[in-house]
Image: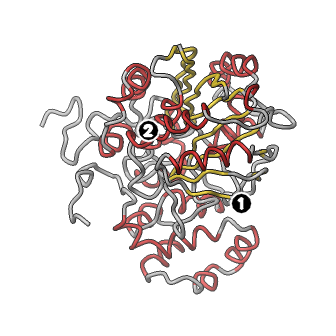
Amino acid sequence: MTTVVGGIGTSHVPAVGAAIDNGKQDEPYWRPYFEKIQPAREWMAAQQPDVCIVVYNDHASAFSLQLIPTFALGVAAEFQPADEGYGPRQVPPVLGHPELAWHLAESLIGDEFDITIVNEMDVDHGLTVPLSVMFGEPDAWPCRVIPLCVNVIQYPPPSGKRCLSLGRAIRRALDSYAGSDADSLKIAVFGTGGMSHQLQGERAGLVNVDFDLAFMDELIAEPDVGCLRPHTAYIREAGSEGIELVMWFVMRGVLDDDVDEVFRMHHVPTSNTSNGLLILQNA
Amino acid sequence: MAAVRDYDDIPGTYVFDGRRAQQGYHLNMFCMSLNAAANRERFQADEPAYLDGYDLTPQQRQAVLDRDWLGLLQLGGNIYYTFKLAALDGLSMQDIGGAMSGISGGEFTQMMIDGGRPVDGNRRVGESRPGQTS
């Protein structure tokens, strides 16, 4: 049995990664955002999780339209930063935890979540930017990472309800883990993407702060209600790319029903996106 | 597949559903090929010759050559794929966000700094905007 130290909901904006990689954090555009997230980094440093399960989406990097798994779990020992069309980010390789990842795969499929198992894939900004947000610029990431990639590019993505249920199944798997390191293993789970944003079309640039803050409130207090929001409501209210927020429900499902809000940050804009960061812990 | 979807009345939004995936498969897979540095070099060296390797419609081919960012979406392109082409041109997401919505990249960036495009007035086609009298 492992210990879940917390859940992190965060946007995964590529420009945030670029700002870190290119030393722009002190520029006027970026400084307010990086100042706001500093307490989250301090919380993370104090938790020292051994493994982070990062729920994210691939953006035409490891997967293309050729093959579109709805849920894909990375079981490899190592994942390299992807070339997304302009060269890979210069960040450390992401080291996996194959023993726990295989346990998750076996437990989830036994629990009727028929996920795709991935032995080789590169990981793009959807996964590496959240690590940078929480850990800054270490020479090596201070934890192992299990990537859980969710399709939110090809419509339809999974429902919020399915994501919440998957998170609860992951929790059951973590509770039944009996690997050699099980008793000492501290786990953090990331739900990434969002918040409101639309990259495409004449409506590009859409932001809905009221939606974002209400989404956080509902995720905390009434996830079984919030998870029922239809896809069209995300697109209409939070923009076509705001639908990434369904991934936050996987994170929420890993946590207990009762959680405490440890930290909340909201900032507009980072690039084209309304940026949110939320940390929850079991009550 | 239903002919009409309940999101079709959202203005200026091209939901990448099965209809668009069928329309844009080869266009998007061309964009996907730009993930490889060697392909980026080959494309930049001779764009028409490179495009001959993909089964694009004449309209899609022209939209690529013209960098018609909105047209690419209307022809089945997905923004995460078409952005690879934009990045190769040195454009940012603000630049093409502006191009798709009829303003400059600088104006788009300022709109975001000012809080982004409001949802009020942008939920449904024909919805009146706040302050609009008619």
Is label 2 in contact with label 1 (beta carbons under 8 Å)?
no
Between residue A152 and residue B108, name the one nearer to us: A152
Between residue A279 and residue A239, name the one nearer to us: A279
What's the chain of the residue with tag 1? A
Q: Nearer the viewer, mark 2 or mark 1?
A: 2
The residue drawn where x is 22% and y is 29% is: B131
Query: In the picture shown, does residue B126 fall above or below B20?
Result: above
Q: Amino acid at mark 2?
A: Ser
Q: Amino acid at mark 1?
A: Glu
Colour scheme in use: secondary structure
Question: The N terminus of chain A is located in which quarter?
Answer: top right
Q: Which residue is mark 2?
A: A165
Q: Which residue is mark 1?
A: A120
Q: Residues within 10 Å of mark 2 (few under 14, many from 20)?
A: many
The residue drawn where x is 53% and y is 62% is: B82
Query: In the picture shown, does residue A3 fall above or below A121?
Result: above
Q: Position of residue A229 (x, y in %)?
A: 31, 37
Between residue A249 and residue B90, name the one nearer to us: A249
Q: Residues within 10 Å of mark 1 (few under 14, many from 20)?
A: some
